[in-house]
Image (spheres, rainbow, N blue to C red):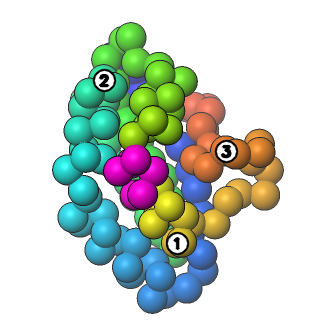
Amino acid sequence: MKRYCYTLDLKNDKNLIKKYIEHHQNVWPEVLESFKKNGVITAEIYNISNRLFFLIDTIDSFSDEKKNKYDLANPIIQKWEKLMWEFQEPLPFRNKNEKWIMMNRIFKL
């Protein structure tokens, strides 16, 4: 099993943050299916203030590239991503077209 950790910010607006959280308490079935179909075993998002932390555990053969390719070809996923982008704020050091930034593990017990 592989683990990936990502981060992203939300727009610093309490109402937008509240709506974003509400969306994630009722994620569209197609989004959940995309995760499962592409080898994601578990997925969790944590937040504090406007900062998000996204943690996924995957099968060993999981590939970010394959999942991204699948999602780009899926109009429902693209609709979800467009909706989520209304709430999300890109990190200033991201690469072009990058949304969630993969984090580096610096400690493990």
Question: SS class of the residue under badge 1?
Answer: loop
Residue at the spot of label 2: 39
Per the rendered image, the range of residues in magenta is: 75-80
Q: Which residue is drawn at 42% across and 30% down?
A: 70
Question: SS class of the residue under badge 2?
Answer: loop
The x, y position of residue 83, in whole percent, is: 45, 66
Within 10 Å of disc 1 (Cα), the crowding (few <14, some 14-19, many 20+) is many
Work out how far the residue at label 3 is from the one at label 2, CA to CA, in angstroms: 21 Å
Question: SS class of the residue under badge 3?
Answer: loop
| Residue 79 falls inside the magenta stretch | yes
Work out how far the residue at label 1 is from the one at label 3, CA to CA, in angstroms: 15 Å
Instruction: Give amino acid for label 1.
Output: Phe
- Please say if the residues under marks 1 and 2 sit with CB atoms less than 8 Å apart: no
Q: Residue at x 67, y 59 (%)?
A: 90
Within 10 Å of disc 2 (Cα), the crowding (few <14, some 14-19, many 20+) is some
Mark number displayed over residue 51: none
Q: Which residue is drawn at 53% across and 43% down?
A: 6
The x, y position of residue 30, in whole percent, is: 25, 46
Instruction: Give amino acid for label 3.
Output: Glu
Q: Main secondary structure of the magenta part?
A: helix
Name which of mark 1 and mark 2 comes first in the sequence.
2
How many numbered badges does the structure rendering display? 3
Q: In the picture, which quadrant includes the N terminus?
A: top left
In the rendered image of this protein, does residue 52 appear above or below residue 16?
above
The x, y position of residue 72, in whole percent, is: 49, 38
Residue 58 falls in which quadrant of the image?
Answer: top left
Q: Which of 5 and 86 is in front in this view?
A: 86
Residue at the spot of label 3: 98
Mark number displayed over residue 87: 1
Judge left or right: residue 75 versus residue 102.
left
